Image (cartoon, rainbow, N blue to C red):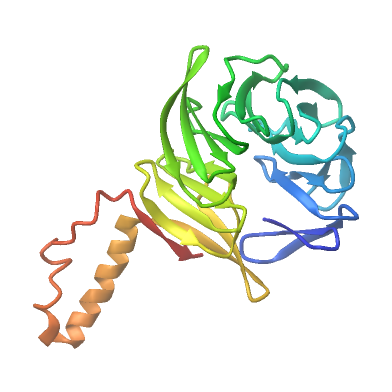
Amino acid sequence: MATAALDGTARIWDLSGKPLSRFQGYLGLFGDMSFTADGNHIATAGDDSPPRLWKISGEELVSFEGHEGRVLRVSTSPDGELVATAGKDGTARVWDFSGKELAVLEGHSGAVWDVTFSPDGDRLATVGEDGTARVWNTSGEELMEAIAREGRLESVSFSPDGLMLATGGSDGVVSFWELRGAIASSVGQLRAHRGSIDKLAFSSDGQRLATRAADGTIRIWDLAGRPIAEFEEGKSFSPDGELVATWENGKLRLWEVKQLDELLKTGCLWLEDYFFTHPQKLNELKICQNKQLGMGNGELGIGKKK
């Protein structure tokens, strides 16, 4: 896990909370970070200088020179060999780990707000100020007709099978698109937040979606549009949407999103203990024994502190 401070420093931690390294990144704020799949490297974007690639020990390896103006997002490929960046100059760019620019993705009018790799690493998706989402190969060729909707698009995520794209807009709406052939088909929308959605992630099984609003609120949803959990002091979540980081009273906390069946199992064990010490209440709460709890099909869940 990586954290960034107002003084331009960043720290790397393991999931037990042990600090692993600290490094000075930028004079201003870190704008975005992305770990490689093996966890050995991290790509960063900052307010005042080009994006960079680091070892998690804090050693800077290379900077990516080419964008004109601020870089808004960075993304690393699943195989850990490429970095993609999205900038206010209206382009996204693909780089190798030596810092060589491999492709310039041009087509948006206005800033490119997000860029992400497909699960197989062969495609990228971008969204921008112009309200379009675009799908490319890693050579910079556009693969299908641009997806257009009203308002600025700020975030994008592929489903784990790579057949669906989710986009988050400045109006708080998530749109889902099926990617087959040369034209994407709209398959639904979710009004997730009141304000803009600046980050999206599917769970590893594709059954849930994590969304983050500009006000820091993080919500977890099933694909039927039902809310699973909400974190008001959310900061970020893992790429698979399974872990949520929150900031409270000067402490960073990590939460694990659990399924409803796991929650019910824990709850029923607690009720068994309660009934043992309060036998007179046994007939008042007929839940676990008679299986009278009709709360869905196990696709819902809740946030549980890790």
Q: Residue at x 50, y 15 (%)?
A: 183
Using residue 301 as the reference point, say whether residue 112 is left or right of it: right
Q: Residue at x 72, y 16 (%)?
A: 139
Is residue 116 visible in the rendered image? The answer is yes
- Residue 120 sits in quarter: top right
Q: Residue at x 86, y 37 (%)?
A: 69
Relative to residue 272, is residue 255 depicted above or below? Answer: above
Q: Residue at x 61, y 22 (%)?
A: 135
- On the image, the x and y values in percent for residue 130 come to 66, 29
- On the image, the x and y values in percent for residue 255 come to 52, 62
- On the image, the x and y values in percent for residue 266 come to 31, 67
Relative to residue 268, is residue 29 depicted above or below? Answer: above
- Residue 246 sits in quarter: bottom right
Q: Nearer the viewer, residue 198 or 261?
A: 198
Q: How many marks?
A: 0
Q: Nearer the viewer, residue 198 or 262?
A: 198
The quadrant of the picture occupied by the N terminus is: bottom right
Is residue 121 visible in the rendered image? The answer is no
